[in-house]
Amino acid sequence: MESISIKTAEDIAGMRIAGKLASEVLDYITPFVKVGITTGEIDQLCHEYMTNVQGTIPAPLNYCPPGYTPYPKAICTSVNDVICHGIPGDKVLKSGDSVNLDITVIKNGYHGDTSRMFLVGEPSILSKRLSEITYECMWLGIAKIKPGAHLGDIGHVIQQHAEKAGYSVVREFCGHGIGKIFHEAPQVMHYGKPGTMERLEAGMIFTVEPMINAGRREIREMGDGWTIRTKDRSLSAQWEHTVLVTETGYEVLTMSEGYPELPDFIKNHQG
């Protein structure tokens, strides 16, 4: 099994900067995500903001894992039944759509990776609830992070919360270690049993990014080689943070001023 890298103080400082910048791209784009804009226009705005304002590099652009074609855009835009890796294009957002914007920037060699859900116009009760439950799933998972805990603890609490709400957890995609490399060990599953999988140590950095479907968990891959949809065409939602394991617990690296309000169970824990 590939060993999980423990980040140095210098790495952690670099990751804090990259993480905040990734979150700030989402702050910047928020007012533009409304009825009538295309996913391609959102991508263009984010790309220009990253390169011209932040001096960051969009990590997805031309990213090419083995067996894939190079990813053609700067961000991922996953609308409605798209689970992940939706490619921006001429799709026009309409009232009631839900869209996940997934941002990864590189600054001074370090990757910051985060995503948020955006509900366009008048969202349905279902899509609002799905987004809220998925947001809670992510934070419940993060709240389990501390030295001595196990990756299975994170997956278990996410799976429990999602399934209690009547939703399902996507199995084929998971969180991942991150640093100077975009995707490294460990794999962070969003389902599982407490006390299983790798044991957490201070200095590990990885993402927690549950993908939760309103219907069944099965997926289908589209012909572009990237876009993943729900097989039953049900809605899907995802939220993502990059998190550092600290000596006493965790630090979320992908926070910024415009970040949405935290769930009460996190605020109370911090207060």
Image (cartoon, rainbow, N blue to C red):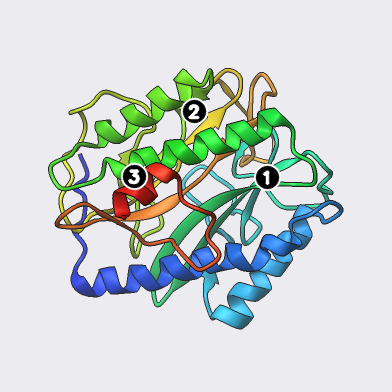
Going by the image, does 224 lie left or right of 245?
right
Is residue 19 shown to the viewer in this render?
Answer: yes
Identify which residue, 180 or 136, lies in the foreground.
Answer: 136
Looking at the picture, which amino acid does disc 3 mark? Answer: Ile
Which residue is labeled 1 in the image?
Answer: 99
Local packing at callout 3 (Cα closer than 10 Å; few below 14, some 14-19, many 20+) is many
Q: Quadrant of the C terminus?
A: bottom left
Using the image, tell me which numbered label, if any, was put on residue 170: 2
The part of the image, by quadrant, that contains residue 202 is bottom left
Is residue 207 shown to the viewer in this render?
Answer: no
Does 33 sit above or below residue 54? above
Local packing at callout 1 (Cα closer than 10 Å; few below 14, some 14-19, many 20+) is many
Q: Residue at x 61, y 42 (%)?
A: 226
Q: Residue at x 34, y 68 (%)?
A: 15
* CA–CA distance in space, label 3 to label 1: 22 Å
User: Mark 3 vs mark 1: which is more N-terminal?
Assistant: 1
Q: Are marks 3 and 2 in contact (CB under 8 Å)?
A: no
Q: Are marks 2 and 1 in contact (CB under 8 Å)?
A: no
* CA–CA distance in space, label 3 to label 2: 18 Å
Q: Position of residue 217 (x, y in %)?
A: 53, 21
Q: Residue at x 52, y 75 (%)?
A: 56
Label 3 SS: helix
Which residue is labeled 3 in the image?
Answer: 142
Does 27 sit above or below residue 156? below
Label 2 SS: loop
User: Mark 3 vs mark 2: which is more N-terminal?
Assistant: 3
Which of discs 3 and 2 lies nearer the camera? The answer is: 3
Local packing at callout 2 (Cα closer than 10 Å; few below 14, some 14-19, many 20+) is many
Looking at the picture, which amino acid does disc 2 mark? Answer: Val
Q: Quadrant of the N terminus?
A: top left
Identify which residue, 168 or 180, lies in the foreground.
Answer: 168
Going by the image, does 64 lie left or right of 236?
left
